[in-house]
Amino acid sequence: MGFFLISLYFLLTALVGSLCVKVCYNKGSSTNLLNVVLVNTAVICCWLMWAIVWLAQWKPLINPVLKAEGE
């Protein structure tokens, strides 16, 4: 449930960011489109980084090496 909940948070962040760009920085259709694409790309990159780190904690590739008592 945690993965989907945080993913929903990132989706809402992208929607709010796109809406804020359209409302606050209205400088023409091509500039608005570029700004919306940049905001969505930034949110997707942040989500992807978070998802990779979160999923990597389930099955780590490197396991800890335990030392014996006498060593």
Image (cartoon, grey):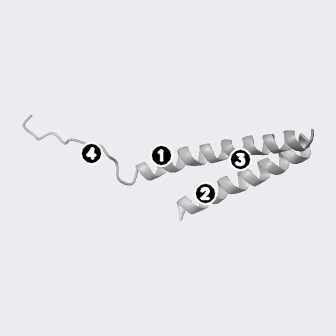
Earlier residue among tags 1 and 3? 3
Amino acid type, mark 3: Asn
Earlier residue among tags 2 and 4? 2
Q: Nearer the viewer, mark 1 or mark 3?
A: 3
Q: Nearer the viewer, residue 34 or 63?
A: 34
How crowded pointer 4 is (Cα within 10 Å; few <14, some 14-19, many 20+) is rated as few
Which residue sits at x=72%, y=51%?
13
Residue ID for mark 3? 40
Amino acid type, mark 1: Val
Which residue sits at x=41%, y=50%?
57
On the rendered structure, is 70 left or right of 32?
A: left
Residue 1 at what x, y percent from top left?
53, 65
Task: Give the CA separation, mark 1 to mark 4.
Answer: 16 Å
Earlier residue among tags 2 and 3? 2
Check the picture and name the quadrant holding the C terminus: top left
Residue ID for mark 1? 53
Task: Give the CA separation, mark 1 to mark 3.
Answer: 20 Å
Residue ID for mark 2? 7
Residue 58 at what x, y percent from top left?
39, 54
